[in-house]
């Protein structure tokens, strides 16, 4: 297979920062931009190339900043534009790049556009959003929102409904209006001129609504699925190609879309022809692990190797040579990866965190590291609904528990496994009060295990998860086979070992990962004569892989 064309965004490692939870510089309990700036040397030491900062724009925070009221202003809790400029300069001074979120499927209901839009049918901004008449004393169609409940909200004054695929405080922008698209392109250009290096595009696969027909209703579900009308449409692709022509082609950017969907969708969004985006996030290895009940994501389904490997390998093979991939297990919308895919017990946490890191950094595609993964941070395991901040949890609680359809303890068990708040607890910097995150009261409780898991201690320990990540990132920067090598699956019948090869020229990278807490038979690495690039064990047992053992061997022919 021919080597794909080189690009810096293929060779980099991206580190995602959730600013609310990263570092608080002023003691108000919320992370902020100056907190990020204060820890740039830490990120440089880790070795990452790109910092992706989740939304920091002005927002009333109904959905933690994904409801933006001013796209050219900084959330007051996070600082000022001067603070942003200082952070950006500090990132660039250290040879790193900055990617920011682009959240333009919807705005905040407090955005001036929407305030004007809801003033009446004659408002010049009415068509900036999606307004429809109801039918039969109800909403225009049966769509449910991503956060439970109807996707339509009635405006009593006009009698019409507006569309919100997320919370009612996040009305969907009407991309069919050329004025909306131009306003978005102008805003993007404004940020590019400030010097940012890319965009992570929030739910960008939903911007092209092609019809408003009722959606299919899953067994036991209360609402219809909007996806057939609103996701991966030809209209969305037309808008993205226009965006590339108007903005993206004029700058050297990393562009990554949050699109969900299948490999077929990804091949269109992120095709090597470069007509839309550089890469997209696949969701099937995360969302596809749920058990498919009417509760959607809420279940206690685990992460068996066969299911995870099947999805990841399918994405590796389908995109190979045709589109660029992303590789990640965790982010701000997922639980902690070591708790979901590995083992967060005291005995196996570090081993399994290193094993999962090996997977992320040796598959083909750009690796994304979510803050705290490099320390092996874990789920927090709240035990009461009052402890959760996430709107998604509270909406689900009202929909399923308060209506008597799901037992409270069952739902809390599901939350403990899969809630987004698990990944949003404050970054664990040291053993001081609140893990060094804040001198005030943290907006979300700090995980009690910060005395055992924190950056200060791990930086001092050469065998820590932190230093294992450093080595993996350094290997990616020095071995082209890790970036551009072709992918071939191995041992696909195994229930315990995830294995594969990467090949480039005369080099072969062989990777073997024990997905379990038991010693398992595996002879794949026996007799391989080459350089062991990395392993989470100092010694090996011929014929076996030890619990959560990871081995990577480079051979040359």
Image (cartoon, rainbow, N blue to C red):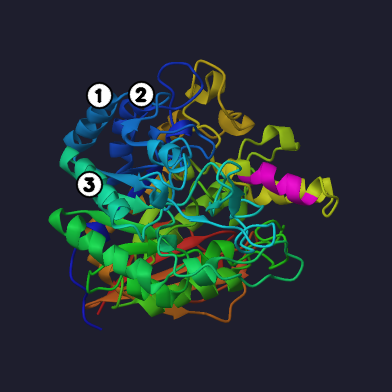
Magenta stretch in the rendered image: 392-400
Residue tagged by mark 3?
186
Check disc 3 and report its element: helix, strand or loop.
helix
The earlier-in-sequence mark between 1 and 3 is 1
Give the farthest residue toward the front: 122
Callout 2 secondary element: loop
Which is closer to the viewer, label 2 or label 3? 3
From the top left corner, tell me how far across and down residue 113 is, in percent. 38, 41
Q: Main secondary structure of the magenta part?
A: helix
Q: Residue at x 30, y 64 (%)?
A: 239
98 and 15: which is toward the camera: 98
Query: Gap between marks 2 and 3, in whole Å?
Result: 23 Å
Q: Are marks 1 and 2 in contact (CB under 8 Å)?
A: yes
Say which of 481 and 137 sits in front: 137
Q: Nearer the viewer, mark 1 or mark 3?
A: 3
The single residue placed furthest to the bottom in the displayed view is 1
Mark yes or no: residue 277 visible.
no
Residue indicated by mark 1? 82
> Relative to residue 56, is residue 291 depicted above or below?
below
Residue 373 in sight: yes
Q: Does residue 241 appear left or right of residue 336 in this picture?
A: left
394 to 199, vertically: above or below: above
Q: Nearer the viewer, residue 442 or 482?
A: 442
- Residue 55: in magenta span: no
| Mark earlier in primary sequence (2, 3) | 2
Q: Which residue is mark 2?
A: 79
Residue 12 placement (x, y as % from top left) = 27, 54
Crowd band around label 2 with a 10 angstrom C-alpha radius: few (<14), some (14–19), many (20+): many
Label 1 SS: helix
Task: Report x, y in % for residue 270.
Answer: 31, 69
Q: CA distance from mark 1 to mark 2?
A: 8 Å
Residue lying at 52% horizontally and 51% vertically, measured from the top left: 353
């Amino acid at each position: 297979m021919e080597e794909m064309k080189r690009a810096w965004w293929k060779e980099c490692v991206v580190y995602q920062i959730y600013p609310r939870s990263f570092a608080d510089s002023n003691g108000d309990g919320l992370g902020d931009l100056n907190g990020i700036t204060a820890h740039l040397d830490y990120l440089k030491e880790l070795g990452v190339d790109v910092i992706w900062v989740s939304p920091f724009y002005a927002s009333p925070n109904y959905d933690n900043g994904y409801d933006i009221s001013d796209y050219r202003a900084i959330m007051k809790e996070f600082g000022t534009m001067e603070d942003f400029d200082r952070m950006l300069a500090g990132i660039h001074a250290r040879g790193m790049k900055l990617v920011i979120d682009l959240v333009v499927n919807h705005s905040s209901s407090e955005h001036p556009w929407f305030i004007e839009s809801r003033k009446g049918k004659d408002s010049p901004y009415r068509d900036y959003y999606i307004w429809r008449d109801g039918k039969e004393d109800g909403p225009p169609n049966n769509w449910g929102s991503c956060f439970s409940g109807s996707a339509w909200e009635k405006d009593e004054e006009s009698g019409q409904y507006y569309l919100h695929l997320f919370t009612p405080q996040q009305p969907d922008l009407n991309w069919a209006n050329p004025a909306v698209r131009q306003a978005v392109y102008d805003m993007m250009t404004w940020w590019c001129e400030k010097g940012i290096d890319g965009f992570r595009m929030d739910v960008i696969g939903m911007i092209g609504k092609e019809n408003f027909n009722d959606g299919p209703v899953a067994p036991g579900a209360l609402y219809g699925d909007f996806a057939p009308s609103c996701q991966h449409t030809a209209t969305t692709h037309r808008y993205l190609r226009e965006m590339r022509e108007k903005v993206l082609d004029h700058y050297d950017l990393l562009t990554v879309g949050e699109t969900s969907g299948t490999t077929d969708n990804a091949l269109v969004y992120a095709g090597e022809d470069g007509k839309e985006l550089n890469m997209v996030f696949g969701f099937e290895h995360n969302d596809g692990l749920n058990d498919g009940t009417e509760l959607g994501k809420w279940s206690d389904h685990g992460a068996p190797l066969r299911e995870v490997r099947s999805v990841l390998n399918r994405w590796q093979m389908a995109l190979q040579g045709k589109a660029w991939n992303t590789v990640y297990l965790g982010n701000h919308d997922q639980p902690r990866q070591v708790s979901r895919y590995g083992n967060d017990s005291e005995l196996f946490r570090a081993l399994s965190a290193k094993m999962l890191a090996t997977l992320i950094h040796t598959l083909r595609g750009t690796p994304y590291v979510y803050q705290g993964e490099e320390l092996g941070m874990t789920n927090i395991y709240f035990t009461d609904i009052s402890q959760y901040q996430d709107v998604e949890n509270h909406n689900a609680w009202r929909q399923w528990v308060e209506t008597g359809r799901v037992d409270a303890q069952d739902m809390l068990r599901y939350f403990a496994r899969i809630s987004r708040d698990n990944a949003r607890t404050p970054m664990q910097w040291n053993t001081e009060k609140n893990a060094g995150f804040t001198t005030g009261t943290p907006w979300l409780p700090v995980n009690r295990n910060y005395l055992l898991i924190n950056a200060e201690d791990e930086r001092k320990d050469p065998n820590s998860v932190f230093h294992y990540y450093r080595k993996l990132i350094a290997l990616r920067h020095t071995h082209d086979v890790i970036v551009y090598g072709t992918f071939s699956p191995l041992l696909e019948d195994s229930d315990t070992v995830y294995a594969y090869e990467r090949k480039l020229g005369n080099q072969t990278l062989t990777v073997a990962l024990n997905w379990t807490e038991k010693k398992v038979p595996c002879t794949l690495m026996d007799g391989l004569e080459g350089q062991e690039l990395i392993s989470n064990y100092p010694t090996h047992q011929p014929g076996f892989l030890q619990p959560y053992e990871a081995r990577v061997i480079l051979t040359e022919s």
